[in-house]
Image: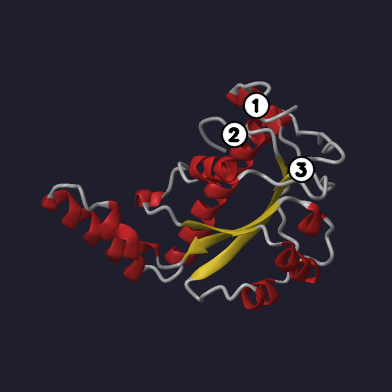
Amino acid sequence: MSSVDQKLSAEEVMLSRHSVRKYERGVTIPEAELNDILSLAASAPSSWNLQHWRFLVVTDQAIKERLLPVTFNQQQTVDASVVVVVLGDLQANLAAAAVYEKASPEIRDMMIGQINGAYENNPQLARDEAIRNGSLGAMQLMLAAKAKGYDTVPMGGYDKDALIKELNIPDRYVPVMIIPIGKAAASGRPTERLPLEHQVIRESF
């Protein structure tokens, strides 16, 4: 299906998204379309609206080739059109002033004080929030790509230290996952889902 042939409903996007590991090499995603996908991804919810995710977008084939050993030679790294490294911001609280710039002084001061207090009083919070909210952005990125007619796969199999070194990722950011985006050369395989009663607990254990 071409990305302009048909609009999928939200339900169709969610149910048709499967992890694709084989991609058509040489496919270019137009810049405007890629920016649309990234903008949709960036509309994900986040704690205090701090938007903890950063999308490190790799389209240069030479850089993707350098990432191949970093991802333990997973072929989608070099065959996909785009490789997005989803990062979580460990200092997302520093964005609070910009996020609440248009709020009233009372609301702005209250929110900034609340956010900074939370970050200062819980050393684990920064990492938890970076990964939690980065994951929300990552899921929205995959759904946005599918809505535009592209496929993805979330990758957790990579050498974190080598990734940081290869892409000069500052200490401020923690890698959450890597997401290749492109046109499937082979369809992703639907996976079995556990029954709802296995996954849902109602009211209390």
In what element is the residue under mark 1? Answer: loop
In what element is the residue under mark 3? Answer: loop
In the rendered image, the vertical position of residue 93 relative to residue 134, given as above or below: below
Which residue is under mark 2? Answer: 201
Q: Contact, CB < 8 Å: mark 2 with mark 1?
A: no
Which residue is under mark 3? Answer: 19
Which residue is under mark 1? Answer: 4
Q: Residue at x 74, y 67 (%)?
A: 62
Q: Residue at x 53, y 54 (%)?
A: 134
Q: Quadrant of the N terminus?
A: top right
Residue 29: % across, % down: 67, 44
- Kindly report the distance in space between the C-alpha atoms of the residues bearing marks 2 and 3: 27 Å
- Kindly report the distance in space between the C-alpha atoms of the residues bearing marks 2 and 1: 40 Å
Residue type at mark 2?
Ile
Q: Nearer the viewer, residue 196 or 137?
A: 137
- Kindly report the distance in space between the C-alpha atoms of the residues bearing marks 3 and 1: 21 Å
In what element is the residue under mark 2? Answer: loop
- Mark 2 or 3, closer to the camera: 3
- Mark 2 or 1, closer to the camera: 1
Answer few, some or many: residues within 10 Å of disc 3's Cα (few below 14, many 20 plus, some between 14 and 19): some
Q: Contact, CB < 8 Å: mark 2 with mark 3?
A: no
Residue 130: % across, % down: 49, 60
Marks 2 and 3, the one that precedes in the sequence:
3
